[in-house]
Amino acid sequence: MHNLSLKAMLTGGFASIAFILLLVGSMSLKAVINMKEDVEEIGHERIDAVDLLSQINTERLVIRGQSLLVTLYPDLSNQAINVHRATYQERIASWLTLDQLLAQYNAIPRTEQGEAMYQELKASIGRWRLQTTPLDELIKALSQAQTVDHYNELFTQYKKQFQNMRESSEVMAAQLLTLVERNKQLTSDVVADASLEADASVLNTIIAVILGFALALGAGIYITRTVLSQLGGEPVYVKEIVNTIAQGDFTAHIHLRDGDSGSLLASFADMVVTMRSMMKQIAEASVQVSAAAEELSASSTQTNTQVTLQQAEITQVATAMNEMAATVTDVAKNASSAADAAQVAHSETENGHRVVNEVIETIHHLASDIEKSTSNVMSLVQDSQEIGTVLDVIKDIAEQTNLLALNAAIEAARAGDHGRGFSVVADEVRLLASRTQASTEDIQKRIRKVQHSSTTTAAQMEHGKASSIKTVEHASQAGDALQTISSSVSAINDMNAQIATAAEEQSSVAEEINRNIITISQAIEETATAATQVTTASQELARLSSMLQNSVQRFKLN
């Protein structure tokens, strides 16, 4: 038990008390539930049974009264019959109600004795019903009697049968009374049992309360002693010691009793001794840390100044390298542009040389075509001259034909009427000869123009031929000049390519140097930032050391 924690002991003690209370409550609840069930049994079974038996007896009395009405009119047969008929349907309804009540009573749980009594009641009701049936038959026979003697005989039988029915009704009434008394007795028994259970529940509750009180008292005493033993003293004294230490006074002396070495107060005393030693060490360390922080702050300030100077110099170098890199980049771009322009010029020169060659070749073809055209024109001049000769012949023939036609017309005129047809033909021939002569003269004019144009064209062709020969010579000279220019441009292009390559290499080196300078600058910036942070941290460390010294001085250690 001494090895258990305070939490475990408190939990165990209160759990035991709670268990006893739960046990007492459960027992009381069980007793209440049992009594409730008994009361419900009385209410739902016994009371219902008594009520049903009362209703059965009521229906019995109703049926008996309806049958008894006939006997009130011994001398008035018609009136008695009318009364019987009027109550017949009521008796049928009463019998149906009686059957329903018996069915409801049959559904109620019963003991063996109660079941036997119910069966006897059911048999008596059956016999009573059998005895009431002949009464209805006798009433019907009375209504049909023809003679007074016959009527009196039937009426005597009716009274006798009615007497038997009344006796059966009395027997049934006695049985109903017995059943009612039986249910009352059962109800009394249930109440008595419930009273006994209530007395037992009260006794058990008293015993459980006494046991719970004794257990709670013992647990309280035990837990109090255990708690004081684990605390090492009274809670008020422990509170005073804790408040003294909390105010920073580590010189307070803690009084311990014999056997309290494992208590909370003893552990607290050991903690105070340890904390007193730690506080002294912290005070000494805070002084050393404060001095080191001041030295670190001075050193970091000097480092920060040097880093700032280096950063300024690196910035100037970086600016110069950026300018040089920009210049080298411009040179590389210009060299590359010059190389591109030279390449374009070389290409254009090659194209010009090729065009000049094509022009020379075209001029050669043109000169050849001009020579051929000149020859053709000269042939055309000769042909036109020959055509002129032929036209002269045709002109002479036309003149001769015209003269012949004129002579033929004269001769036809001389012949008179016989030469009239010939005269017409001669006129037509003369007309055709005239037209031929006119056309020939027109053709001669055109031929002369063609001859003049051909002669002029031939002269121009000769002049163009001479010009084309000179053009070929000049084009050849231009081709030679373009070839020389192409060679020079190729040499310039090679030199530009070398300059561009060298400039690009120089630009790459400059960019690499620039990147290295930027990296160095960033490193110096980071160093400067770190130096600033170190300065700030050292100042903060000095401030914290001062605060720590002030905090330690609040504690009373000696």
Image (tube, rainbow, N blue to C red):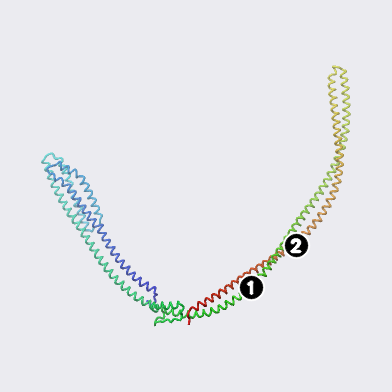
Q: Is residue 161 left or right of residue 503?
A: left
- Residue depicted at 26% across the width and 60% down the height: 39
Residue 474: x and y in percent read 84, 50
Looking at the image, residue 449 sits to the left or right of residue 276; the answer is right
In which image quadrant can residue 107 be found? bottom left
Dot 1 corresponds to which residue?
Answer: 305
Looking at the image, which residue is at 28% across and 70% down?
207
Give coordinates of residue 16: x percent, y percent: 34, 71
Q: Residues within 10 Å of mark 2 (few under 14, many from 20)?
A: some
The residue that disc 2 covers is 499
Q: Give the mark nearer the N terminus: 1 vs 2.
A: 1
Q: Residue at the far left: name it.
A: 149
Helix, strand or loop under label 1: helix
Above or below, 487 against 368 in this view is below
Spatial distance from mark 1 to mark 2, Cα to Cα? 45 Å
Residue at left offset 86%, top offset 48%:
470
When asked about the image quadrant of residue 17, the answer is bottom left
Q: Quadrant of residue 451?
A: top right
Mark 1 Cα shell of 10 Å, populated few (<14), some (14-19), many (≥20): some
Residue 362 vertical placement versus 317 (above, below)? above
- Residue 142 location (% of width, % of height): 14, 42
Question: Which quarter shows the N terminus?
Answer: bottom left
Tell whether 473 sits left or right of 324.
Answer: right
Which percent across, then down, holds residue 549?
52, 78
Q: Nearer the viewer, residue 25 or 543?
A: 543
Hey, what amino acid is under mark 2?
Ile
Residue nearest the viewer, comparing 134 with 10? 10
Relative to the observer, which residue lies in front, 112 or 477? 477
Which residue type carries mark 1? Thr
Q: Which mark is residue 132?
A: none
Label count reads 2
